[in-house]
Image: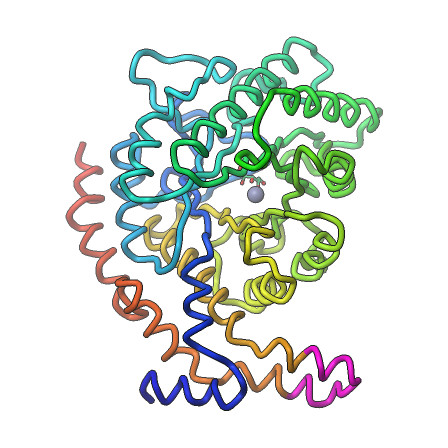
Amino acid sequence: MSYSEAKERYLALGVDVEKAMERAMRTPISLHVWQGDDVRGFDTDPDKPLTGGIQTTGNYPGRASNPSELMADMDMVLSLVPGKKKINLHASYGIFEDGWVDRDRLEPKHFRLWAEWLKQRGLGADFNPTFFSHEKCDPLTLSSPNKETRDFWIRHGKACIRISQYLAEETGEPCTMNIWTGDGYKDIPGDRLGPRLRYKESIDEILSEPYDFDKVKPCVESKVFGIGVESYTAGSGEFSLLYAAMNRDKCIPLMDNGHYHPTEMVSDKISSLLSFFPEIALHITRPVRWDSDHVVLFDDETREIMKEVVRCGGLEGRVHLALDYFDASINRIAAWAMGARNAEKALLYALLENGEEMKDLQDSSDFTSLLVKMDEEKTLPFGEIWKEYCSRCQVPGDGEWLEEVRQYEKKILKEREKK
Ligand code: RNT
Ligand code: ZN
């Protein structure tokens, strides 16, 4: 079947494919730098353990271990992913041109080279303070009972606001700044309230740093548990959502679909949050039994999340889409590109739904037709549309891109192993 035949099939169902492609091309999805180096960053010993309840598994050869390698790898990924992209940085990826400083002393200048790199490529940025994998985690950060620890991390958070504002101004696009800590306890705590009150106060202090809310969008990301943090998480679902609700003029909630109980679906939560918040942010990932951060697939939940974003009118700046997965057991660049392509694919797929018709069927209680139509939509010739989309975005189609990664692996990644 050709693209134009496929387009006709969709048109017969009342779907304008050209319009859908155009909307997908305008919607930014934020590519996370941390898939490239197993969340290690450049500011501390790369062999230190990853802390904060997250874990990368695998030791596939060729990991990027400095800024130029990571940037080169990202360029490779960018050449394989269609649509509008942003880059999601972490504070631990600062580049020290004139000497190392600790995280509480970071400045915009440490992201100057990133800003240049972004501007050359016409990309916007998102940012994250790094509250983990650092000797000042005691093991808590913003909720620590130790004031010195809290103050260090508050200074870090404030520095990150200034950096986010700088990145927004340099790139001309708003920058989400996501506050996530792994603060919590392995075993049953004797005091659940104390850490949460301290966490709240610390975020208040960070957000007292001046910033333009049109440019910097601080987010609070919730979590249910992490490895070694199984019994209690200070920034739980209720805590984070309520924090954002009570501070709507200063920050927005962020949902990571790996951070809920396995039968809870983020696709079902988007509309609830959008009933109250003008803007929300998402981390798109794939949890396998826990917050495992497997590579995003073109699976039911990814498609359902994107459908909800589209149905709820989330595309015009109301929902900030970002990726969050890290796999070191397979080729990292293939993992990176595949997850990003799948998120983009799910977005395009979601835009090809005749939402008005589905809504009418539901409102007129024709649940029979609704179920049949939603199910039959799965075998429409979507592959042809996706192929056309990739070609218009000048990136390789399915079946073509992996070979390019293999060539890069042979030429670049294998060489790194020899050093
Ligand atoms: C961890 C959170 C968080 C991190 C990144 C690296 O569970 O999802 O978003 O993955 O900040
Ligand atoms: Zn996340």
Q: Nearer the viewer, residue 296 or 139?
A: 296
Q: Is residue 178 left or right of residue 190?
A: left
Residue 180 drawn in magenta: no
* Quarter of the image that includes the N terminus: bottom left
> Could you tell me which residue is drawn at 17 percent across and 36 percent down?
418
Q: Position of residue 411 (x, y in %)?
A: 15, 48
Residue 364 drawn in magenta: yes
Q: Nearer the viewer, residue 168 or 155?
A: 168
Ligand 1: quadrant of the figure: top right
Q: Magenta segment, which residues? A: 359-372
For residue 18, which quarter of the picture? bottom left
Q: Is residue 395 left or right of residue 172?
A: left
Give the answer, above or below, for where 310 lies relative to 151. below
Q: Position of residue 38 (x, y in %)?
A: 41, 39
Q: Is residue 34 visible?
A: no
Q: Is residue 44 left or right of residue 302?
A: left
Give the answer, above or below, for where 14 lies relative to 321. below
Q: Is residue 340 left or right of residue 333?
A: right
Q: Position of residue 281 (x, y in %)?
A: 60, 47
